[in-house]
Image (cartoon, rainbow, N blue to C red):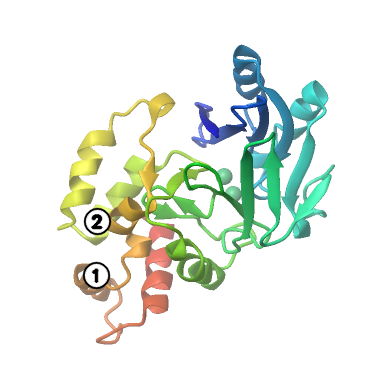
Amino acid sequence: MIVEQIWTGNAYRNFNYLLVCDDTGEAMAVDPLDHEKCLMAARMNDWEITQILNTHEHFDHTGGNSAVIEATGAKLLAHSNAKGSISGMDRGLKAGDVIKVGRTVELEALDTPGHTMSHICLLSHTDMPALFCGDTLFNAGAGNCHNGGHPAELYDTFVNQLTQLPDDTLIYPGHDYLANNLGFTLDREPDNVKAGTLFEDVKDQDPNAAKVTTLALEKEINTFFRLQSPSVISALREAFPDLPDRPDPKTVFLKLRELRNNW
Ligand SMILES: [Zn+2]
Ligand SMILES: [Zn+2]
């Protein structure tokens, strides 16, 4: 599988993706907001976009659908519950559904509520595990729940699905927030050496050649995976003095999500 990460350069810092079968050149466009850049990348490489996947219904993920469909005739896939909020869907996805692209690419749909309640992450079944995680998981961060989401559902998604994936899974989120999110990690956990070193590496990075993390690295630098860290918990107690001695992971996650909203 070829993964083409496309930096949109917009104010929301979206990443779009083309997932390509290197045998047939057929491609799936993931959240192709910047339809011009997506279509251009396909044209330059002689790839044919046959499917579009929207991870969820927000406009910065669906806004390029009609232009790409008009240019390519691609079929539109999204969460089965998004039928009312995404127009022109051809296929509604449920947990465990498999999507084929060309001959060699197989992607599994994960039903990952939290950021919205109709959010799909795609997990590749091919040569390398890779997760296309929209606004559920960001590099060093977690999606917000302001526009149709629920923090408790996001916690369940993190604990029951994301942390269970193989450690070498490559993480491809819907936005470039890595440097900013590392600032939050370091605010919550100033002694996180790995996060400090990585911040120095990526703070001036070119988003056209963005750092790709793995799940193993996320578990070291992403506060939302570090719910048992003594320094995360003690810093959290400064903000929430009522926090119990040994807070359960769900409480820690929800408090972190709350702090992140105003950070
Ligand atoms: Zn969103
Ligand atoms: Zn978004």
> How crowded is the residue under tag 1: few (<14 C-alpha within 10 Å), some, or many (20+)?
few
Q: Residue at x 52, y 37 (%)?
A: 12
Q: Residue at x 32, y 58 (%)?
A: 219
Quadrant in which residue 68 is drawn: top right
Give coordinates of residue 30: x percent, y percent.
Answer: 63, 38
Q: Is residue 240 left or right of residue 103?
A: left
Please name the residue that numbered disc 1 is placed on. Answer: 229
The front one of 156 and 115 is 156
The front one of 83 and 218 is 218
Do labels 1 and 2 touch, CB within 8 Å?
Answer: no
Please name the residue that numbered disc 2 is placed on. Answer: 187
Instruction: Work out whether mark 1 precedes mark 2 in sequence or the reverse, and give the earlier one.
Output: 2
Q: Secondary structure at mark 1?
A: loop
> How crowded is the residue under tag 2: few (<14 C-alpha within 10 Å), some, or many (20+)?
some
Q: Is residue 49 left or right of residue 134?
A: right
Q: Amino acid at mark 1?
A: Ser
Q: Amino acid at mark 2?
A: Asp
Q: Secondary structure at mark 2?
A: helix
Check the picture and name the quadrant holding the N terminus: top right
Q: Residue at x 45, y 65 (%)?
A: 164
How far, Cα to Cα, is label 1 from label 2? 14 Å
Disc 2 C-beta below 8 A from ligand 2: no
Q: Residue at x 81, y 54 (%)?
A: 83
